[in-house]
C-alpha cells in the first residue's frame, strides 16, 4: 500500500469515497462538481496498492448504476499511472467505460485492461499529450455516450513530478483540464472531478497544481 497506519489515514480512507459519490451526485444536479480528494485508482477489490485503499471511482460508478442515477458512465483517467484497480473492478460492467491515458513505463508494472488504454512514452510533451487527450476523450464519449464523466485530473504528469516521467508543463496541465471540462460541457455531459496523483516536497506548490482543475471548472461553467 505504501502508507503507514494511523487514525487519520483510517478517517480519510472512509471519508474520501463518500466525497467522490457526493461530488458525482452534485455534478448530476448542477452539471459540474469538484472533489478536493479522490482518484484512488490503484485499489482493487481484495487488496490495496499504490497509496490507494478503497477505489472511490469504482465505488461511485457501481453505486450510481445500482441506484439508477445513471445508465452509463465514463471514467476518464488522466493520472500518469494507469488506473489498474478501476479497470479490474469494472471489467465486467459494460455500463461503466474505463479510459486511462498514462505513461506506459510507469507504475503499475503489470497493467490491467481498461476499455480504452493509451500508454504514452516517457518524455511526452504538451502538444503530443494534449492532442492525445482530445482525440481519446472524443472517442470515449462516442463509444459510451455517458450520462456522467468521472474525471481523474492527476497532476503527476507534471514535468518535475518525481514519480511522473512525462514532460508536461503547468500550462499543459491547465490546457488539459480546460479541454476536458469544455468538451463535457459542449456535449451536455455532467462531469465530476477528483484530484488524482501528484507528488512534491513543497505541499503549497502541489496544492496549486491540484487547484488548476477547480479554477478551470469555475471558468468553464460560469461563462
Image: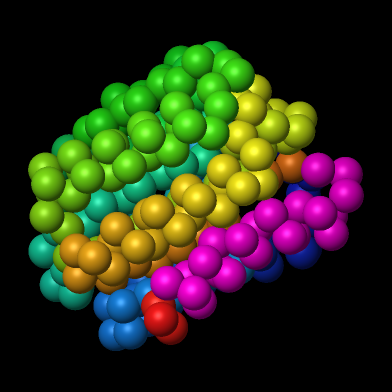
The residue located at (28%, 37%) in the rendering is 136
Q: Is residue 53 placed above or below 28 in the rendered structure? A: above
Q: Is residue 36 above or below residue 97?
A: below
Q: Identify the residue at horizontal 54%, vertical 62% (top origin).
A: 213
Q: Quadrant of residue 24?
A: bottom left
Q: Residue furthest right?
A: 202
- The residue sitting at 32% across, 50% down in the picture is 75
Give the quarter of the image for residue 4: top right
State left or right for residue 23 relative to residue 76.
Answer: right
Judging depth in this view, the residue of 121 and 15 nearest the camera is 121
Q: Which residues are magenta?
A: 200-220
Instruction: Check the picture and name the quadrant holding the C terminus.
Output: bottom left
- Left-right relation of 76 to 6: left
Q: Is most of the magenta stretch helix, strand or loop? A: helix
**Percent x, y of residue 130:** 43, 38
The spot of residue 104 in percent (x, y) is: 48, 18
Up the image or down, 123 lies above or below 138; here it is above
Amino acid at each position: 500500500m505504501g502508507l503507514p497506519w494511523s487514525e487519520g489515514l483510517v478517517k480519510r480512507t472512509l471519508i474520501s469515497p463518500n466525497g467522490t459519490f457526493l461530488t458525482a451526485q452534485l455534478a448530476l444536479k448542477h452539471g459540474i462538481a469538484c472533489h478536493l480528494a479522490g482518484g484512488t485508482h490503484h485499489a482493487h477489490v481484495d487488496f490495496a496498492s499504490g497509496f490507494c485503499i478503497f477505489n472511490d471511482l469504482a465505488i461511485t460508478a457501481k453505486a450510481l448504476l445500482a441506484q439508477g442515477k445513471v445508465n452509463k458512465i465514463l471514467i476518464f483517467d488522466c493520472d500518469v499511472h494507469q488506473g489498474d484497480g478501476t479497470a479490474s473492478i469494472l471489467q465486467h460492467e459494460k455500463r461503466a467505460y474505463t479510459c486511462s491515458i498514462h505513461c506506459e513505463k510507469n507504475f503499475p508494472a503489470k497493467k490491467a485492461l481498461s476499455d480504452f488504454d493509451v500508454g504514452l512514452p516517457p518524455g511526452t510533451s504538451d502538444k503530443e499529450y494534449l492532442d492525445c487527450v482530445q482525440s481519446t476523450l472524443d472517442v470515449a464519449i462516442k463509444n459510451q455516450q455517458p450520462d456522467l464523466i468521472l474525471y481523474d485530473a492527476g497532476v503527476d504528469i507534471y514535468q518535475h513530478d518525481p514519480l511522473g516521467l512525462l514532460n508536461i508543463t503547468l500550462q499543459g496541465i491547465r490546457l488539459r483540464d480546460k479541454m476536458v471540462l469544455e468538451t463535457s460541457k459542449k456535449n451536455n455531459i455532467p462531469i465530476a472531478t477528483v484530484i488524482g496523483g501528484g507528488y512534491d516536497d513543497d505541499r503549497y506548490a502541489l496544492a496549486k497544481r491540484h487547484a488548476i482543475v477547480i479554477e478551470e471548472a469555475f471558468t468553464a461553467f460560469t461563462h
